[in-house]
């Protein structure tokens, strides 16, 4: 496409860009909520090896994420700058995601660890290339601010759909195969609360694989939709080629204090939210003994976040982004975390389950605030910044976002 827009973006273009936001949302939520249970129950990896797996994957992907943005930025082909990255990263990302939920017939614990380490690190690293290219494509699809805003609106809407879809796929496959989340490897098919539900570990393994296969197909279709359905202005920055490691861009970024503060806030918010998501299923299953209600609690949490996003967007227009940040954290997220810490069956008795559901809805509202403001805030900061609009910023933001998670994983590992 030429440097000037030959045609305005149509509904089909907006729809395809929105579909491209589903894979990262769907896979990210599925991994955050269910992968820890899968690793311990189905793959039967020890907690110590699980800590090594998580730590290594996040640290290695953090190091790789820093360079992905710069590599995307220096790419220049006749097919475009970003579409080749989206196309070439879609297939390996989908493959790694599928094999991440596959339990190999390996009895050696070290062999299992290597298997999941390869595909966990591979998925994180390769999907970063997909995410960076997809996020940057909005700046290369059109020169018109209104059309860019429309693309972001579609992307946000479909990312929300991906959140709900991840829970529906997991729950649907488990119900279809009559499997239960909560199989205890030490009890020979008995649920953790002592009730015999019948299905074996093989049934639960099959349910995870079916859900992974569905997610893989969705990943492929949505990635291809972005490649063939969204235009890219190939000569938008023809005169602004930069080196693979542009020091000037980093210096310009370091001087832009609002964007740095935004990245720090985003990093630690994601750190807290992701940590809560990763441990929530295990907590409900082993601490509260409500394994049969895990899917419903998680679905309520996600649904509350989705519904709340629309209300938070209205509130942002009235009170601004900063107040929404404080309101979401202080009124919703922190009380939700505190409620999970103090809730016990001895304290609440028969009221434990209703309390968990109410807390899930309350926490989902808080997470909805973070989803509502981040996309608009990051775009606003990029548009008002005085540096070049490039995927370099996405590479740096990826590093900042992952580093706190890596430090947390190291802390958890050495505390074992």
Image (cartoon, rainbow, N blue to C red):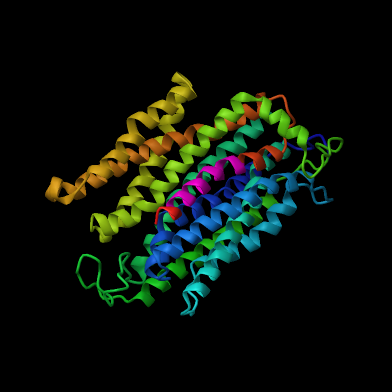
Q: Is residue 333 left or right of residue 405?
A: left
Residue that appears at 49% across and 79% down: 106
Q: Is residue 241 left or right of residue 53?
A: right
Residue bounds of the magenta highlight? 398-412
Expressed as whole percent of the image width and height from the top left, the position of residue 206 reads 42, 73
Q: Quadrant of residue 4?
A: top right
Expressed as whole percent of the image width and height from the top left, the position of residue 222 reads 60, 55
Position of the C terminus by quadrant: bottom left
Q: Is 403 a magenta residue?
A: yes
Residue at the limit of the structure toward the right, as seen here = 239
- Considering depth in this image, is 42 or 149 the residue closer to the camera? 42
- Considering depth in this image, is 244 or 182 the residue closer to the camera? 244
The correct choice, above or below, for 258 with respect to 365 in the image is: above
Q: Mainly helix, strand or loop, the magenta region? A: helix
Expressed as whole percent of the image width and height from the top left, the position of residue 55 reads 51, 55
Residue that appears at 75% across and 43% down: 73
Q: Quadrant of residue 243?
A: top right
Expressed as whole percent of the image width and height from the top left, the position of residue 203 reads 37, 75
Specify whether residue 293 is in view.
no
């Amino acid at each position: 496409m030429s440097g000037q827009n030959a045609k305005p973006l149509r509904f089909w273009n907006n729809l395809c860009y929105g579909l491209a936001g589903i894979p990262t949302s769907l896979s990210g939520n599925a991994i955050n909520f269910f992968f820890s249970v899968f690793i311990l129950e189905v793959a039967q990896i020890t907690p110590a090896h699980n800590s090594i797996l998580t730590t290594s994957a996040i640290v290695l992907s953090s190091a790789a994420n820093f360079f992905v943005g710069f590599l995307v930025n220096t790419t220049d082909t006749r097919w475009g700058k970003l579409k080749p990255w989206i196309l070439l990263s879609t297939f390996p990302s989908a493959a790694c995601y599928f094999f991440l939920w596959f339990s190999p017939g390996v009895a050696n614990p070290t062999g299992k660890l290597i298997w999941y380490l390869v595909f966990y690190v591979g998925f994180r690293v390769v999907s970063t290339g997909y995410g960076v290219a997809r996020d940057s494509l909005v700046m290369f699809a059109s020169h018109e601010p209104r059309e860019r805003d429309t693309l972001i609106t579609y992307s946000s809407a479909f990312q929300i759909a991906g959140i709900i879809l991840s829970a529906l796929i997991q729950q649907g496959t488990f119900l279809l195969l009559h499997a239960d989340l909560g199989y205890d490897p030490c009890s020979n098919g008995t649920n953790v609360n002592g009730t015999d539900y019948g299905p074996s570990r093989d049934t639960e393994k099959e349910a995870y694989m079916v859900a992974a296969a569905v997610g893989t197909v969705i990943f492929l279709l949505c990635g291809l939709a972005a490649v063939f359905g969204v235009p890219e202005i190939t000569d938008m920055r023809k005169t602004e080629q930069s080196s693979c490691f542009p020091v000037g861009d980093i210096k310009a970024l370091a001087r832009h204090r609002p964007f740095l503060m935004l990245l720090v806030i985003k990093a630690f918010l994601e750190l807290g939210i992701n940590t809560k998501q990763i441990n929530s299923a295990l907590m409900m299953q082993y601490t509260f003994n409500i394994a049969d209600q895990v899917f419903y609690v998680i679905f309520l949490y996600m649904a509350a976040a989705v519904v709340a996003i629309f209300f938070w967007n209205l509130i942002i227009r009235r009170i601004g982004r900063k107040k929404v940040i404080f309101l979401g954290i202080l009124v919703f997220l922190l009380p939700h975390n505190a409620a999970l810490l103090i809730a016990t069956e001895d304290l609440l008795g028969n009221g434990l389950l209703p309390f968990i559901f109410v807390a899930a809805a309350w926490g989902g509202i808080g997470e909805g605030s973070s989803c509502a403001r981040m996309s608009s805030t990051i775009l606003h900061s990029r548009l008002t910044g005085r540096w070049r609009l490039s995927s370099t910023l996405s590479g740096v933001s990826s590093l900042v976002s992952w580093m706190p998670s890596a430090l947390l994983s190291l802390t958890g590992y050495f505390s074992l």
